[in-house]
Amino acid sequence: MKTLLTIALLLSVTFAFAQAEKDVASRVEKLRLALIDPTVANLSELSSIHLSYGHSSGKLENQAQFIEALVSGASDFAKVSFEDQTIQVEKDIAIVRHNLAADVLDGGTSNSIKIGVILVWQKEKGQWKLLARQAYKLS
């Protein structure tokens, strides 16, 4: 009986972890799509009011600045892909790492970028919210 209980407990923990990882992956994909087609509603829904959003240039933005830059077109992504993504979940925190490859429009001129990114997601009221993001230059 103890063995059956142990196996059941192990399976439920494994399932919960796999489900959390799937939920985070889904939110990351929604973020990728929101970078291409940003709205105040979709970016607000994905990000925490406590957001710290760091660019590879060293520039930092809070949630309002992050949303404004995308919605206004100051940061204009034409195409974005996330490559080599990993997700680590520990209770209500998830750490996502990937390489971001994108075509961006800067003053009407197209430019391609490839940077490394770390995202920190926190579960708030049942939803995963982007709490922090830091981009860095790849060597």
Image (cartoon, grey):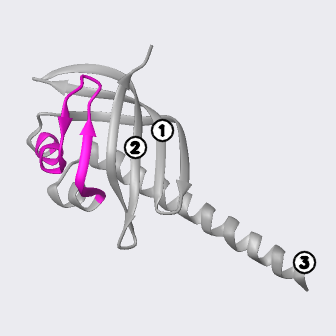
Residue wearing tag 1: 97
- Give the mark nearest the N terminus, 2 or 3: 3
Q: Does residue 78 show up magenta in the picture?
A: no
Q: Is residue 54 left or right of residue 119?
A: left
Q: Position of residue 26 (x, y in %)?
A: 45, 57
Residue at screen point 34% across, 35% down: 134
Q: CA distance from mark 3 to mark 1?
A: 37 Å
Q: What amino acid does circle 2 point to?
A: Leu
Q: CA distance from mark 1 to mark 2?
A: 6 Å
Q: Nearer the viewer, residue 38 or 93?
A: 93
Residue at screen point 10% across, 45% down: 68
Q: Nearer the viewer, residue 73 or 132?
A: 132
Which is in the foreground here, disc 2 or disc 3? Answer: 3
Q: Position of residue 64 (x, y in %)?
A: 12, 50
Q: What amino acid does circle 3 point to?
A: Thr
Q: What amino acid does circle 1 point to?
A: Arg
- Magenta range is 46-70
Disc 2 and disc 3 in contact, CB within 8 angstroms: no
Disc 1 and disc 2 in contact, CB within 8 angstroms: yes
Q: CA distance from mark 2 to mark 3?
A: 39 Å
In the displayed structure, would residue 3 be above or below residue 52? below
- Give the mark nearest the N terminus, 3 or 1: 3
Number of numbered markers: 3
Q: Nearer the viewer, residue 50 or 20?
A: 50
Within 10 Å of disc 2 (Cα), the crowding (few <14, some 14-19, many 20+) is some
Q: Position of residue 121 (x, y in %)?
A: 40, 53
Which is in the foreground here, disc 3 or disc 1? Answer: 3
Within 10 Å of disc 1 (Cα), the crowding (few <14, some 14-19, many 20+) is many
**Which numbered circle lies on residue 3?**
3
In the displayed structure, would residue 60 be above or below residue 5? above
Disc 3 and disc 1 in contact, CB within 8 angstroms: no
